[in-house]
């Protein structure tokens, strides 16, 4: 793993951990390589949540298990973290929170009494922000600007007290420093700090999304909120539907009328959308679906992470029809692939799914700016003539798609099997021709395949395959291992799978797939569709992501 340092904040839901995380990341990200992730219990208030902020000598995007500095914000904040604490961990806490059984080195941090100077415990978090900013030797002017912007809607007195609390916290941290090995970047980098949700939302806007209808479900709701917050700026109509069935049907209606729409949901919500997915398939109406994975079955672990819905996305719906599934693993790809999803849905008139998970959506990454392509905004809607046939059979499986009111033709769409005109039919020959027409799109879709990315030496003999949020984990291993016989194949389009993946696998004498599920779902698809023999699977399905230390240990066991 890269040389890094992990700061963990532990407290209850409702104590302001997210605000504290955002302030630290926004300021530290201008001077260090940083990454943050969080562990959230399924509680509105109470429980125990944690935030990990990882500083490193190089860009990182993976979770570190070992805690270096631990800040306890209540009297039960330590219990669930004791396995991550080592003898050199420095534990900062109110004296009353220590019970005598804590490992690590104890450091009394009386935030409550310090906040008393300002007349309210609400300043505890700003004191702690100042304390951590002092340890990291962050630019104080940058921190003051962030505080002022954060509380700009509150009274001048509250802003002034927060600034004073920051200064007090910063002074209190004198004498506590980071290890010398953890240095600031040599020059300012134009990094943008964003989480996976924001990256996916920006991709939707870049793809021309102007309609979203969804029913709230963790962890997908954040994307609905993001597009709602920016709806006026980008002309996005946002509808919170009464349920998931209504959400997908509204979105299909939006595409039928000429909009570019999407739904965002999680596994349980997507299960209710399956009939609507099939409706997209037979009517050849585009739709973009974001599936934010969390553990199932049923409600499972509502606020935890898993990659358990790949097979659900591949096989969802009744009958046979093509679909495209993307699984981004870092923010740039989340933006690009979501943007591409709207283009491909429009071009091929098929459902396109973006498969993420809670860990990816809620983690904060650094991303460099890059230019956006114009191509994904191309529209494939055609102006109709009086003799327009919505499902015209011919040399090309993708019929011209008209919309009502644009041209002189009548646009007929029906959920039953239909003729070229869009009229219901029970003609067996027409049925077969229409089914073949829809399925023939897959060969065209594979021509637009979003190619897999090989990271590491080209003359490898061991190949690790991963998808989605495990990208940062495996990439860090490849960048830091002494072994030069191992490469990483990052599969960003998980369906349909391209035959070129066989060439990567054939070169290796050992193929390992890393997944956060119990059955090796991608490994199964590679075998079924491409006859790629996976020799070993590294699986985790506790509801937690892999840590970089855990992954290295497991990999050492299976490598020949």
Image (spheres, grey):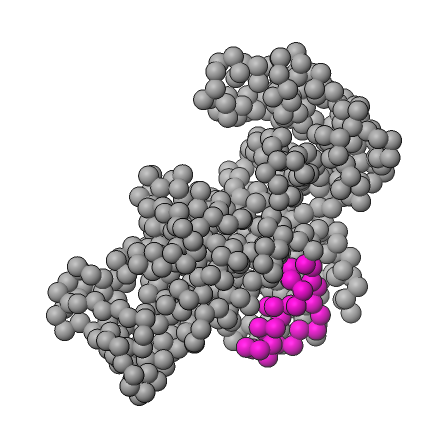
Residue 501 pos. (x, y %) = 56, 72
Check if residue 253 falls in the magenta segment. Answer: no
Work out whether 334 lies above or below 387. above
Residue 494 pos. (x, y %) = 52, 66
Q: Residue furthest right?
A: 100
Check if residue 519 falls in the magenta segment. Answer: yes
Work out whether 241 lies above or below 508. above
Residue 392 visible in the current orientation: no
Of residues 308 and 173, which is closer to you in this image?
A: 308
Instruction: Report the number of numbered marks.
Output: 0
Residue 376 pos. (x, y %) = 35, 57
Which residue occupies 36% across, 80% down? 435
Residue 465 location, quadrant: bottom right
Quadrant of the drawing holding the C terminus: bottom right
Q: Is residue 506 left or right of residue 79?
A: left
Q: Residue furthest bottom?
A: 429
Residue 531 location, quadrant: bottom right
Which residue occupies 42% across, 72% down? 322
Which residue occupies 76% across, 42% down? 80
Q: Residue furthest front?
A: 242
Find the magenta span and give its range: 515-541
Residue 518 pos. (x, y %) = 67, 64
Residue 456 location, quadrant: bottom right
Residue 334 visible in the current orientation: yes
Which residue occupies 44% across, 50% down? 215
């Amino acid at each position: 793993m890269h040389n890094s340092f992990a700061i963990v904040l532990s407290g209850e839901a409702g104590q302001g951990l997210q605000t504290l995380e955002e302030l630290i990341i926004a300021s530290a990200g201008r001077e260090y390589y940083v990454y943050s992730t969080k562990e959230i219990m399924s509680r509105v208030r109470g429980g125990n949540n944690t935030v990990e902020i990882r500083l490193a000598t190089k860009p990182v995007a993976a979770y570190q298990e070992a805690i270096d500095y631990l800040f306890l914000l209540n009297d039960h904040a330590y219990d669930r973290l004791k396995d991550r604490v080592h003898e050199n961990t420095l534990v900062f806490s109110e004296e009353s929170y220590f019970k005598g059984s804590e490992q690590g080195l104890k450091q009394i941090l009386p935030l409550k009494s310090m906040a008393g100077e300002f007349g309210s415990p609400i300043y505890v978090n700003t004191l702690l922000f100042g304390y951590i900013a002092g340890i990291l030797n962050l630019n104080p002017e940058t921190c003051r600007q962030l505080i002022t912007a954060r509380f700009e809607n509150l009274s001048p007195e509250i802003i002034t007290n927060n600034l004073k609390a920051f200064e007090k916290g910063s002074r209190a941290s004198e004498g506590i420093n980071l290890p010398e090995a953890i240095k600031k970047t040599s020059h300012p980098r134009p990094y943008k700090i964003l989480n996976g949700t924001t990256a996916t939302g920006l991709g939707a806007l870049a793809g021309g999304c102007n309609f979203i209808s969804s029913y709230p479900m963790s962890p997908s709701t954040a994307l609905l909120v993001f597009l709602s917050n920016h709806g006026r700026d980008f002309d996005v109509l946002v509808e919170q539907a009464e349920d998931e069935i209504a959400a997908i049907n509204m979105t299909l209606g939006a595409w039928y009328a000429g909009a570019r729409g999407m739904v965002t949901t999680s596994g349980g919500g997507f299960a209710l959308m399956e009939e609507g997915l099939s409706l997209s398939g037979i009517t050849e109406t585009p739709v973009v679906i974001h599936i934010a994975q969390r553990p199932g079955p049923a409600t499972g672990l509502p606020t935890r992470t898993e990659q358990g819905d790949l097979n659900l996305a591949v096989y969802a719906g009744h009958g046979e029809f093509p679909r495209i599934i993307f699984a981004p693993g870092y923010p740039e790809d989340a933006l690009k692939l979501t943007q591409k999803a709207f283009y491909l849905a429009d071009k091929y008139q098929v459902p396109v799914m973006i498969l993420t998970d809670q860990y990816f959506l809620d983690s904060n990454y650094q991303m460099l700016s890059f230019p956006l392509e114009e191509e994904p905004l191309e529209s494939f809607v055609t102006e109709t003539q009086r003799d327009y046939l919505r499902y015209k059979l011919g040399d090309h499986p993708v019929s011209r798609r008209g919309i009502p009111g644009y041209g002189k033709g009548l646009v007929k769409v029906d959920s039953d099997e239909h003729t070229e005109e869009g009229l219901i039919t029970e003609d067996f020959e027409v049925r077969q021709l229409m089914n073949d027409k829809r399925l023939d799109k897959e060969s065209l879709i594979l021509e637009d395949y979003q190619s897999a990315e090989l990271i590491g030496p080209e003359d490898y003999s061991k190949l690790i395959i991963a998808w989605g949020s495990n990208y940062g984990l495996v990439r860090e291993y490849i960048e830091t291992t002494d072994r030069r016989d191992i490469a990483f194949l990052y599969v960003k389009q998980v369906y349909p799978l391209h035959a070129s993946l066989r060439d990567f696998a054939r070169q290796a004498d050992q193929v390992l797939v890393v997944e956060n599920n119990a059955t090796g779902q991608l490994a199964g698809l590679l075998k079924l569709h491409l006859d790629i023999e996976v020799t070993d699977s590294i699986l985790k399905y506790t509801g937690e992501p892999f840590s970089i230390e855990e992954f290295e240990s497991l990999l050492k066991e299976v490598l020949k």
